[in-house]
Amino acid sequence: MSRVILGMGCDRGTTLATLEAAIDEALSTIELERGAIKVLATIDKKRDEQGLLQLAEKYHWQMQFFTAEQLAQVDVPNPSAVVLKYMGTPAVAEAAAMLAAKAGVSELLIEKHKYRGSDGKNATVSVVRLSNE
């Protein structure tokens, strides 16, 4: 099975159910399942984000956190002025996934999949193939 890094960004207070739905919807586009995920990567400002912590614990995913400064150094295909305004970097999901995988844009299987849950919260998902797996 192909192993991947999941980059994720979300609104504060996003529920576990919304995060799972965002991941499942994104992974279905490349015919992968949650079992393929090895690492969940995001911005360090989300270290206390309960939904993300619950997600990593539930699926036994290693978590990697990156600073806004680290994420801002990554050239991404879908930068966001809104994310830059609130997080200090033009991208979280794409940049975190690429940094965690030590990969470039060519390794992105999913660039920036946006999902809005029934809780009204937004989540973004990016997926990078692990080349050394």
Image: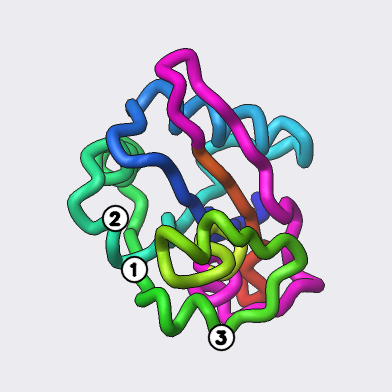
Splitting the image into 4 quarters, where does residue 42 fall?
bottom left
Q: Which residue is mark 1?
A: 65
Q: Residue at x 77, y 35 (%)?
A: 29
Q: Which mark is residue 73?
A: 3
Nearest the eye: 2 or 99? 99
Which is more N-terminal, label 3 or label 2?
2
The extreme top residue here reads 118
Looking at the rendered image, the disc whose residue lies closer to the viewer, 2 or 1, is: 2
Nearest the eye: 123 or 16? 123
Splitting the image into 4 quarters, where does residue 124 fall?
top right
Provide the residue span drawn in magenta. Answer: 96-122
Q: Which residue is mark 2?
A: 46
Q: CA distance from mark 3 to mark 1?
A: 15 Å
Residue 128 is inside the magenta segment: no
Tag 3 secondary structure = loop
Residue 12 x/y as whole percent: 31, 40
Residue 44 x/y as whole percent: 30, 66
Q: Which mark is residue 44?
A: none
> The residue under label 2 is which amino acid type?
Lys
Left or right of 113, for residue 14? left
Please state, as top left, top right, bottom left or bottom right, where the C terminus lies in the image.
bottom right
Mark 2 Cα-neighbour bin, 10 Å: few <14, some 14–19, many ≥20: some
Residue 11 x/y as whole percent: 40, 40
> The residue under label 3 is which amino acid type?
Gln
Residue 82 x/y as whole percent: 55, 55
> The residue under label 1 is which amino acid type?
Phe
